[in-house]
Image: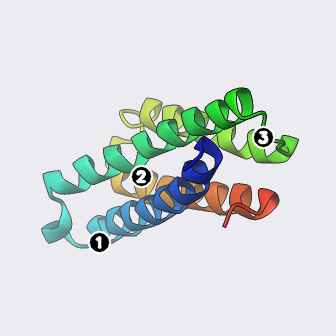
Amino acid sequence: MTFAGIHGVWAWVVVGSNAIAGFWALAAHRNEALRKRALWIFTAAAQIAIGIQVMLGVLALNIEDKPIGQFHMFYGFVAFATVGIIYSYRQQLEEWTYLLYGFGGLFLMGLGLRAIFLNGAT
């Protein structure tokens, strides 16, 4: 499988994992029983998946010379930057941490979907 092929499949891992992490964090905001260490491990894995996705996209672009739309790249790098922004606000918004990571996860999911459908990576 090519880097572009892996990038297309991994995009759905990014979307799905960030959706689950986002909904889990929002549910944990309302239900303390869901506030487990596993939530943060899963959220970290979902966000690390974005870094892997960006790396796969860069490899597909540079090694395979795969054509790509500018907005596809834009959404990928915005997602990558968003992870850093969410992390940087965690202490300022400590009272609303679960909402920050919940809506942040759903925003990342949306960015991933937008990038997929802009480039047709299905």
Q: Which amino acid does label 3 sit on?
A: Lys
Residue 70 at x, y percent in the picture: 86, 41
Quadrant where the image shows the C terminus? bottom right
Tag 1 residue: 30
Query: Is residue 103 in sight in this rendering?
Result: no
Q: Residue 22 carries which label?
A: none
Seen at 75% across and 40% down, the residue is: 73
Please say if the residues under marks 1 and 3 sit with CB atoms less than 8 Å apart: no
The mark lying in front, picked from 1 and 3, is 3
Seen at 73% across and 33% down, the residue is: 61
Residue 93 at x, y percent in the picture: 41, 41
The mark lying in front, picked from 2 and 1, is 2
Q: Is mark 2 on a helix, strand or loop?
A: helix
Seen at 13% across and 70% down, the residue is: 33
First along the sequence among labels 2 and 1: 1
Tag 2 residue: 101
Q: Which amino acid does label 2 sit on?
A: Tyr
Q: Is mark 1 on a helix, strand or loop?
A: helix
Tag 3 residue: 66
